[in-house]
Amino acid sequence: MKALVHAGKTGMEGLAYREFEKPEPGAGEVRVKIKIAGLNHRELIILERHKETEPPLVMGSDGAGVIDAIGEGVSGVKVGEEVIINPGVGWKEKSDAPPLGFDILGHPLQGTFGEYIVIPAENALPKPSFLTWEEAGVIGVAGLTAYRVLFTRAKVSEGMKVLIPGIGGGVATLMLQMAKAAGATVYVTSRSEEKCKSALELGADKAFNSEGDWAEELSGEKMDVVIESVGAATFNKSLSQLRTGGTIVTFGASAGDVVDFNLRSFFYGQYNLLGSTLGSGEELGDMLQFIEKHGVRPVIDRMFRLEEYKEAFDRLEKAEQLGKIGFYLG
């Protein structure tokens, strides 16, 4: 099969669109012929995390396609069934944290950026009929991450005020849409005037420049929840906008992993700091039900052929996208 494989060198130099062995399903597994795969910021991290001494890796965590082979002992699914892939393996029920043995497609497990992938049968969910192939193929990581952050971790509900710094990526845009669907008031920031304008069109109550005075832009209003994925560049600004007893949830650190903040101010403020990453199979099912009920659809930024991966990765690395970037495979 053709696949986007990382091997031999770290970084983009190790990435190549080439032939790779077509996998065969074992007991309890199915093989999916991928139609659409989604690109995530995670792939940029894997380019450095996957070492040259490790075996070749098919990248990619998101995908949707058609089951074309079934392993021994599999029931409840059949060849020809259209499915969306759960990117997390080994995390079935909603819990405080993933269990031991939890892994993610695209590292350390072989991923979705190939014509075929073998996964546990339980990771193949029926493709929601209300989603296009493009939408189904890119929503797994972003939708699951957004849903767990908002509803499992931050407990966002009607009437709450939510701030999402750094609008533009797939997770952030889905968070905006989901939080609005839940009845929250949502504020966003971006350095891009165009992204701020697009966020308003998606339903944001206010969008303003990340480099401005946030307190002034918010007219002194304090937030119930701030969702942090930028990291060092915005963390203290985010923290300063929380109401007493408010919650800040972090699921990423695109602008730096290490943050200094005033611990005394934090405990005097009675703040809650929560971490989150991806989610369980149960939450993925809940997310799909939620977006169907509320008519939420992932924003598609650009679609590429898999062999155009360099352009796609470059667009993501430069943060030029609004919403999700995807690949056509079949």
Image: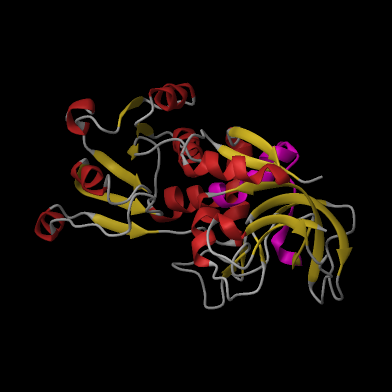
Q: Nearer the viewer, residue 12 or 130?
A: 12
Q: Nearer the viewer, residue 289 or 319?
A: 319
Q: Nearer the viewer, residue 269 or 17?
A: 17
| Residue 132 highlighted magenta (yes or no) | yes
Q: Quadrant of the C terminus?
A: top right
Q: Residue at x 26, y 39 (%)?
A: 223
Quadrant of residue 87 within the rendered picture:
bottom right
In the rendered image, residue 163, in percent from the top left (x then y), is placed at 33, 38
User: Is 295 drawn above or below residue 235 in the view shown?
Assistant: above
Q: Is residue 76 left or right of 243 when viewed as pictured? A: right
In the rendered image, residue 291, in percent from the top left (x then y), is placed at 59, 40
Q: Is residue 274 left or right of 105 when viewed as pictured? A: left
| Residue 30 highlighted magenta (yes or no) | no
Q: Is residue 266 left or right of 100 when viewed as pictured? A: left
Residue 86 visible in the picture = no
Q: Which residues are magenta?
A: 121-143
User: Is 143 drawn above or below residue 85 in the view shown?
Assistant: above
Q: Quadrant of the N terminus?
A: bottom right
